[in-house]
Amino acid sequence: MRVIFAGTPEFSRVALERLHAAGFDIPLVLTQPDRPAGRGMKLQASPVKQFALGHGIAVAQPHSLRLDGKYPEEAAAARAAMEAAQADVMVVAAYGLILPQWVLDLPRLGCLNIHASLLPRWRGAAPIHRAIEAGDAETGVTIMQMDAGLDTGAMLLVEKLPIAVQDSTGSLHDKLAVLGGRLIVEALEIAACGGLRAVPQPADGVTYAHKIEKHEAAIDWSLPAEVIARRIRAFNPFPGAATVCQGEAIKLWRCEIDSASRMSDKAPGTILSATEAGVAVQCGPGVLRLTELQRAGGKRLPATEFLRGFSLPAGAVLG
């Protein structure tokens, strides 16, 4: 089976690697144009492009696939490359571009998407973040037949995955990437035998995982400790939950609910104690113990090391 692959970040690279290892013929990869990254803001190839080039796979990087859009020449060149590839199917995983109808119609078996949620819950751009933020007990991967809607296509394969108590978006992403890679290989193997069956998504239970915005990182200490803890996990590694103390921004990477501390009459955000065990902060209600923090320009540090270089005295208020 000949497969065109479209994807950009690490989540996609894992799927591409699994498809390649499984022996599928991949004549063409589509990925986002190189972007500035790092302190020097030098152009950097996506993880998918790096893998493709390392394995001799042709790469196309159009800014758009719309033939009537801002980059018609790039779209036309991409279309010519896709037609020449004569693929049976196109696999899409976190590509980052909207696929026009001509793309959906081009391969014999259409376009299959690897989506990191249990559809129809968490359609959209940030399903892993939003599942953790909402306190979901489980998530998973859906292999979906793509249509013109936003993650509205029929489901082909679904597998659930529990969300661990301390899972961050980073750790859950890695688990789901592995699961997605395995499921897409299974889906294509079943499709090759003509056994893949599409099931329409149910009308009930639809939620949207809106893109994470940087302004969401600021912690509101008047929220319950459980809600803040979920946000810290959900925003790790991006954009990183943040607060301010003594005029300096501090990133919060890990925490735990401090069930041993009693509710105090202190205002939300007040530091109750700062010890080797962590920084206990009054929330509204509940107490949260911060266990991994980072100063601007510094490294992520366990609380005990962080406190050696930055004082967080009891009574100070985080804002």
Image (cartoon, grey):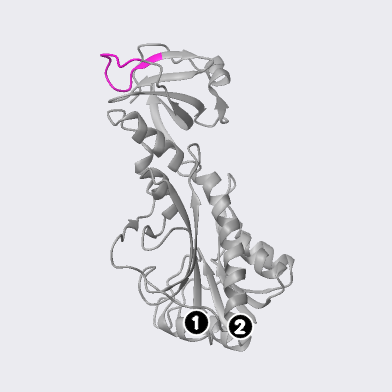
Q: Secondary structure at mark 2?
A: loop
Q: Give the quarter of the image for residue 13.
A: bottom right
Task: Name the residue beneath numbered marker 1.
Answer: 110
* Percent of width and height locating residue 301: 57, 27
| Residue 152 spot, x, y in % from top left | 36, 70
Labelled pair 2, 1 in contact (Cβ < 8 Å): no
Residue closest to the eye, 91 or 242: 91
Q: At 39% across and 78% down in the image, what residue appears?
A: 69
- Give above or below for 291 relative to 29: above
Compared to residue 89, the image places residue 203 above or below, namely above
Task: Tell me, for residue 288, which label it has, or none.
Answer: none
Q: Nearer the viewer, mark 2 or mark 1?
A: 2
Residue 149 relative to residue 251: left or right: left
Q: Main secondary structure of the magenta part?
A: loop
| Number of numbered labels in the structure image | 2
Residue 193, numbered label: 2
The answer to whether residue 44 is above or below residue 310 is below
Nearest the camera: 279 or 60?
279
User: 143 and 215: which one is in front?
Assistant: 143
Q: Which residues are magenta?
A: 262-272
Residue 29 among those drawn in magenta: no
Answer left or right for 201 relative to 91. left
